[in-house]
Amino acid sequence: MNKIVKNIKEALNLCGIKDGMTISFHHHLRNGDNVINMTVNALQELGIKNLNLCASSLFQVHSPIISAFDDETITTVESGYIGGDVGVAISNGKLKNKAVFRSHGHRPSDIKSGKIHIDVAVIAAPTSDDMGNCSGKFGKSACGSLGYAMADAQYADKVIVVTDNLVSYPLCDFSIPETQVDYVVCVDSIGDPEGIVSSTTKITRDPAGLRIAKFAVDCIKNSGLLKNGFSFQTGAGGASLAAAMYLKEIMLKENIKGSFCMGGITGYIVDMLEAGCFETLFDVQCFDLRAVESLKNNPRHKEVSAEHYASPTSKSCIADKLDVVILGATEIDTDFNVNVHTNSQGIIMGGSGGHSDVAAGSKLSIIVAPLIRARLPVIVDRVNCISTPGKTVDILVTQRGIAVNPAKKDLAERLKASGLPVFDIEALKNIAEDFSGKPEPVERGNKIIAEVLYRDGTVIDEIMNYCG
């Protein structure tokens, strides 16, 4: 049996690619990915039209696919996150049909149920053997976990593995097994290592960011949740990394042994594992080289699928065992609804990713954000897009103070008693507006260019075209 084919175009033909199909990709190569662009270029050369591009996320590096919107090779996009020029193009109405946003947990749920039927999945694999056993932990394009690709590989009708590091059979330490793979393509480069992972992710040095991080950790400390068995997730932003640093100091000082940390893993989280702060790391995505090395070498650092991470319809998922999560926001409104899909002008520049999943699953969800960003208040009357509903958001932390969801009165009293600067969210909004003024309402078009699905499948919001 020979699964090796000479190029992506041949593999697509062997898969029976046709107009109107759904083709899927993962995003572990992030802003260094070459595979989506190579595949879309091959589809254009084949003359295939009216495709649904179902990618777990899209970045600035994928801007060449905009030409496939223009010639209607791609007429629908489904994703968890859309950034860069691709988001701008969709905001300007270049895509024929509505884009559809799903959370990282909702996506594998809909793939498994058949609500998303993937005809062809294209898996960018930093290492593969000739039968398709593949991994992200090895090779010049190593990205670590392939957790977001696992549902695609398991449930797609046809699966193509694209690699730039073909090794002898068998590759024993695989993430995706040969039993799920139809064809293997070897190319010169699946991605640019400079864009795949960073050698260093840095803690913020901004005094406001450090103050936000310290407040966030003080909230955790005084919540009553920071004790043996504690579980935690945070992001890779500067303030989030600073929060991890402060949290590590407290856990070591007070000899607190956490159970697990999860999500996108950085070297700072690896440091916490190795220092004994946590028993296990669950890794659906590596954010830097230290995390990649740890995943490869440390048996207590476990690769998990997006379904295991956060699917609301799996028999259980890790997100539902979280104590505390620290998340970001582009906007938050006075009902604690959070926007991470659009900027202040309503242009698509992101997406929920796992934001709404872990906010719903955790016991304590903390939003960290500066009170003012780009001379505009972060707190508004109504966010331009609801990404995560306010009912699942517990605390907003800014450099000027902390707001607690009114539904959490006991928590608010506990934080006030600890001496933290707790305000009503309206009061924080007024402080911001005293500095920056009240922003003008965003002018919206009359065309729905994207719908945002909550993790239960309901439409939580719609995004209109940009009129600027």
Image: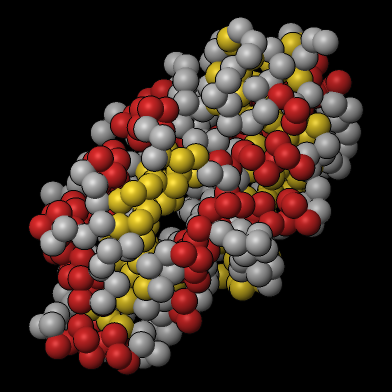
Task: Report the front residue among 339 and 267.
Answer: 267
Residue appearing at x 50%, y 71% in the figure: 360
Whether 129 is drawn above or below 439: the answer is above
Residue appearing at x 69%, y 12% in the figure: 130
Task: Report the front residue among 393 and 249.
Answer: 249
Whether 280 is drawn above or below 168: the answer is below
Query: Picture quarter containing residue 226?
Result: bottom left
Question: At which x and y percent is residue 326?
Answer: 34, 62
How is the protein colored in the picture? secondary structure
Question: At which x and y percent is residue 431?
Answer: 20, 82
Residue 54 relative to residue 201: left or right: right
Residue 199 relative to residue 352: left or right: left
Task: Report the front residue among 426 and 216.
Answer: 216
Question: At which x and y percent is residue 228?
Answer: 27, 64
Residue 206 relative to residue 171: left or right: left
Query: Picture quarter containing residue 314?
Result: bottom right
- Asked if residue 251 shows in the view, the reply is yes
Question: At which x and y percent is residue 120?
Answer: 78, 34
Q: Which quarter of the rendering shows the N terminus?
A: top right
Residue appearing at x 75%, y 28% in the figure: 179
- Asked if residue 210 shows in the view, the reply is no
